[in-house]
Amino acid sequence: MKSFVSALGVLVSATSVVAHSTFQEFWSNGVDEASSCARLPLSNSPVTSVSTADIVCNAGTKPVTTICPVTAGQNITVEMHAQPGDRSCTNLAIGGNHYGPVIVYMGKVDNAASGTPTSWFKIDQEGYSPTTKKWGTDTLNDNCGKRSVKVPATLAPGNYLVRAEAIALHAASSAGGAQFYMTCFQVNVASIGTVNPPGVAFPGAYKATDPGILINIYQASSIANYVVPGPAVWTG
C-alpha cells in the first residue's frame, strides 16, 4: 500500500462506502476459528458517535453462541476485511484512505455468549509512526487484515469479550467525523493467572474532542505526536 505521506494529496471526498470494513475472523494461537465466535455487525458502516451504546460492540450484531478457547500468554489474532466472507489478500482490509489507529480491548463477563462487559482494558494498540509514515490501518493492509496480540499471561481465567477496533480519521477534522469500526469476539480464557485489571467503560472511554479523535491527519504537525484514544495498554 502507498505510504500515508504519498496519499496526503488525495481528497477526503474520494472515500466511499466501498472502503467500509468489518473485523470478521478470529484466531487462537494459530487456530483459525473463522467467524464462529464473532458478534458480527449487521453492516460494514461505521459508528460515528462515542456517546451511544453502539460504541461498545457496534450498531446491532448477529447473535452467536460459540465461545472460542484462548490461553493466557498465547497469541490471538483479529482479522478485518471489507466484504463479508472475503479473506482475499489481494483486496485491502480497509481502503479508501481510511487511515487511523487499531486497538484491541478485553472485558470480563459471566457469560461471553450473552453478557457485555462494564469494564474494558486495552491489550494492544498501533497509532501513527512518524518514522515509517504509517498508521495501524496500514499495518492491517500489509498483513491481509490480521493483527496479532498476546493475551497477558497473568490474566485471570474466565469468559471475556475481545473488542477489536479501527478508527478511520480521514474526515475527523470536524466533530463527529471520525469513523469507528469494531467487532466483539466471545472467548474463554484458560489461565493460572489471578489478575483482574482495571478498565474503562464504553461509552465513556472516548470523548468526541479527544486529540486522537478530533484531528486533521492531513496536517503533518497534527500527527507528529499522535495520541491513541483510550487508556494505556495493560500488559499484565
Image: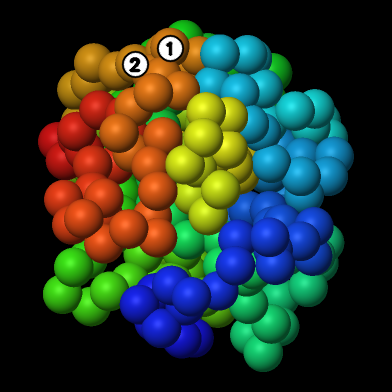
Q: Is residue 60 left or right of residue 134?
A: right
Disc 1 residue type?
Answer: Gly
112 or 98, which lies in front? 98
Name the front one of labels 2 and 1: 1
Name of the residue lying farthest toward the bottom: 90
Left or right: 175, with 138 as reference point: right
Whether residue 208 is situated above or below residue 90 in the rendered picture: above
The span from disc 2 to disc 1 (Cα, nearest Å) is 7 Å
Q: Is residue 55 visible?
A: no
Residue drawn at (34%, 16%) of the image: 200
Indicate how the structure is coloured in the image.
rainbow
The three-letter code of the residue at mark 2 reads: Val
| Up/down of 199 relative to 211, above or below | above
Judging depth in this view, the residue of 191 and 136 nearest the camera is 136
Asked whether the viewer can see residue 198, the reply is yes
Which residue corresponds to the image point at 50% horizontal and 14% vertical from the top-left?
203
Residue 204's tag is: 1
Horizontal relation, residue 156 to residue 201: left or right: left
Where residue 51 sits: x, y (%)? 56, 13
Quarter of the image for residue 152 reads top left
Please report contact status of discs 2 and 1: CB closer than 8 Å, yes or no.
Answer: yes
Residue placed under numbered mark 2 in the picture: 200
Q: Quadrant of the C terminus?
A: top left
Q: Secondary structure at mark 2?
A: loop
- Across and down, in percent, residue 147 comes to 43, 63
Residue 234: x percent and y percent? Answer: 19, 35
Q: How many marks?
A: 2
Residue at image x 77%, y 49%? 44
The label on residue 38 is none
The image quadrant that residue 82 belongs to is: bottom right
Q: Position of residue 53 (x, y in %)?
A: 64, 14
